[in-house]
């Protein structure tokens, strides 16, 4: 009889080895990409807010973790009405995060460590403090600048009603009426998100010209790609027709709406791809495209458009073997015809961390207000991570998930900053819980995040989940991630590819082969007995082997090699 649990981390990869990996062709097809939310990663100056210099100081940690690239959420000049997704100047760094020189240094240091840098691009809307929008308001009706947004007269006898029935994703009408320069109530402008985020009119040529210039600005700075925020937005149906029903007014609805997933977005991406392909180094585009189906998601990653698209259908799937197998098959079947890699993601800055989602009953959605069963959630989260990293394609890791962080569900109302929280009938507005700054050390005013506290309060006991507390501890979640990413690089059959060979397995268990590699995931709440598939590479929990069989603990994933 032998017993296995998560292996300790290997010796950190050398700089030269990482650099060699980073230079390989088609790196993005099996890349592990780590999302940094700049506000909450590391604070270098003690003001309680994360910044670029803080990120730069922690790049060796990410190199040693074993990721291939770092995706940075927005750090542009912004009034921060929506945590930087309201951009006032796309070519400037907000002072709270640093300067353009800091951005340049971060990119250079990352490249020296063999890491690539992907930055957020926000093309659906700007800030209401963007120079174009401020001039559009100041110049009044008929201003050419208003044509770069969606300004419309209102309905009703005195224009007192919105131009159509669209509602904001954050709740309330998607239209705000302006006060004209002469003080009278005037036109309305469209904002699918907060009122401080007016939507661009992508039918106007100046908008396209501006964003092609912005792409070149950052490509010339050396970034390796762009994550495109609301990539399914931008183009609106001609005439801005009424929606009629608001049952599907969510980022991930069941139908194409007049303002999301319109076919015209693909013309924009074909133009952008021509620009990207002018640059060396295999730069990439990643789409945040909330589409009704993975089949429609595949439209964004055709050979002449974008490289990757987030697989939100997978993120929203319950910890259930049958559901997971279905979404894996549909994803791979959809991506194969367009030649694009699948992507897999469990958490990000907009959803409840999966260690908390999986701690609660299925069916509660991706924003949950209850802590649930912490032990159960962590056990499932670890197993789900090994399953995700075993699938063919590219995987995304959200900062702190490698520490097993739960969502902070009990933040006081007075500290919340999610704009959706302050508007009714929109998103649940509890995204702050996944954005609490991560812990680096056991002690300190913010557990090593910085010297001056943190912009969102961290829970008591956060230090025991810190990098310091978990480093070198066999079986810790951090060491599980380090080991998994090291094994993923070492095993030729892991990573890129477009299919899996499903193996017979008990109900509630997923088992598949990829060459000499076998993955078994037990999604049930009880131990199961399966064939032993060779030598155990890594497990998320306990596995006991006897006479050619293996007893896999509840909610546990095992990696084997038959070589």
Image: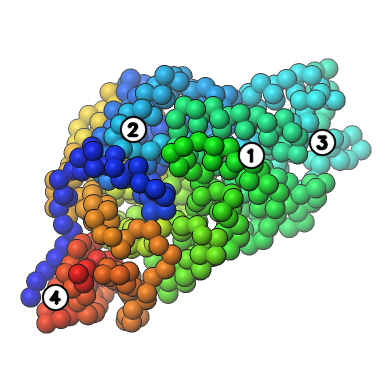
- CA gap, disc 3 and disc 2: 45 Å
Q: Position of residue 92 (x, y in %)?
A: 52, 22
**CB of mark 1 within 8 Å of CB of mark 4?**
no
- Name the residue rendered at 49%, 22% in the picture: 94
Check disc 3 and report the residue beneath it. Answer: 152
Look at the picture and state if 549 lies above or below 163. below
Residue drawn at (61%, 37%), measured in percent from left and top? 123
Query: Dividing the image into 4 quarters, which one contains the C terminus?
Result: bottom left
Q: Residue at x 18, y 73 (%)?
A: 534
Alpha carbons under labels 3 and 1: distance apart: 18 Å
Q: Is residue 329 visible?
A: yes
Q: Which residue is mark 1?
A: 124
SS assignment at label 3: strand
Q: Quadrant of the N terminus?
A: bottom left
Sequence order check: which comes first, mark 3 or mark 4?
3
Q: Earlier in the sequence, mark 2 or mark 1?
A: 2
Residue receiving disc 2: 110
Circle 3 Cα neighbour tier, 10 Å, few/some/many (<14 / 14–19 / ≥20):
many
Residue 382: quarter of image:
bottom left
Precedes in sequence: disc 3 or disc 1: 1
Question: Does residue 467 show up?
Answer: no
Structural crowding at the residue carrying mark 2, measured as other residues with C-alpha within 10 Å and reported as few (<14), some (14–19) or many (≥20)? many
- Which residue in the protein does label 4 denote? 545
Mark 3 and 1 residues: CB-CB less than 8 Å, in contact?
A: no
**Label 3, label 4: how far apart the Cα atoms are:** 69 Å
Could you say where residue 385 lies in the image, as x and y percent from the top left? 32, 58
């Amino acid at each position: 009889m032998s017993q296995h649990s998560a292996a300790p981390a290997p010796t950190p990869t050398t700089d030269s080895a990482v650099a060699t990996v980073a230079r390989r062709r088609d790196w993005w097809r099996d890349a592990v990409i780590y999302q940094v939310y700049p506000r909450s990663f590391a604070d270098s100056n003690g003001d309680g807010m994360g910044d670029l210099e803080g990120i730069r100081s922690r790049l060796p940690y990410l190199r040693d973790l074993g990721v291939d690239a770092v995706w940075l959420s927005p750090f542009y000049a912004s009034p921060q009405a929506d945590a930087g997704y309201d951009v006032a100047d796309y070519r400037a760094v907000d002072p709270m995060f640093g300067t353009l020189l800091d951005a340049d240094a971060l990119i250079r240091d990352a490249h020296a460590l063999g890491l690539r840098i992907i930055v957020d691009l926000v093309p659906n809307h700007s800030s209401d403090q963007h120079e174009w929008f401020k001039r559009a308001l100041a110049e009044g009706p008929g201003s050419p600048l208003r044509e770069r947004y969606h300004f419309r007269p209102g309905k009703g006898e005195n224009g007192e009603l919105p131009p159509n029935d669209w509602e904001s994703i954050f709740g309330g009408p998607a239209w705000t009426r302006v006060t004209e320069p002469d003080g009278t109530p005037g036109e309305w402008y469209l904002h699918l998100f907060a009122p401080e985020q007016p939507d661009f009119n992508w039918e106007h040529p100046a908008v396209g010209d501006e964003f092609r210039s912005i792409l070149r600005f950052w490509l010339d700075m050396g970034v390796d790609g762009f994550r495109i925020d609301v990539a399914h937005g931008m183009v609106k149906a001609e005439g801005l027709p009424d929606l009629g029903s608001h049952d599907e007014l969510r980022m991930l609805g069941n139908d194409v709406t007049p303002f999301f997933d319109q076919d015209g977005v693909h013309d924009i991406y074909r133009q952008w791809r021509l620009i990207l392909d002018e640059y060396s180094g295999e730069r990439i585009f990643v789409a945040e495209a909330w589409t009704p189906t993975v089949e429609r998601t595949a439209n964004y990653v055709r050979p002449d458009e974008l490289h990757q698209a987030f697989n939100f259908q997978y993120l929203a799937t319950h910890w259930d073997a049958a559901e997971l197998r279905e979404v894996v098959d549909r994803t791979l079947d959809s991506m194969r015809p367009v030649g694009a890699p699948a992507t897999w993601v469990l958490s990000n800055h907009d959803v409840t961390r999966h260690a908390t989602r999986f701690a609660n009953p299925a069916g509660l959605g991706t924003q949950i207000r209850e802590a649930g069963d912490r032990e159960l959630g962590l056990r499932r989260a670890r197993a789900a991570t090994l399953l995700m990293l075993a699938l063919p394609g590219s995987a995304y890791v959200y900062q702190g998930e490698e520490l097993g962080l739960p969502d902070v569900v009990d933040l006081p109302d007075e500290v919340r900053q999610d704009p959706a929280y302050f508007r009714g009938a929109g998103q649940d507005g509890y995204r702050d819980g996944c954005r609490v700054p991560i812990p680096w050390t056991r002690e300190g005013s913010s557990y090593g995040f910085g010297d001056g506290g943190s912009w969102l309060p961290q829970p008591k006991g956060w230090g025991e989940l810190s990098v310091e507390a978990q480093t070198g501890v066999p079986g810790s979640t951090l060491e599980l991630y380090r080991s998994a990413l090291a094994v993923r690089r070492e095993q030729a059959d892991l990573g890129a590819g477009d299919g899996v060979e499903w193996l017979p397995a008990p109900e509630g268990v997923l088992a598949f082969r990829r060459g000499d590699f076998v993955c078994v995931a037990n999604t049930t709440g009880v131990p199961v007995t399966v064939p032993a598939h060779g030598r155990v590479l890594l497990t998320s929990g306990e596995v006991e082997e006897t006479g050619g069989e293996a007893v896999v603990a509840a909610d546990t994933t095992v990696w084997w090699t038959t070589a």
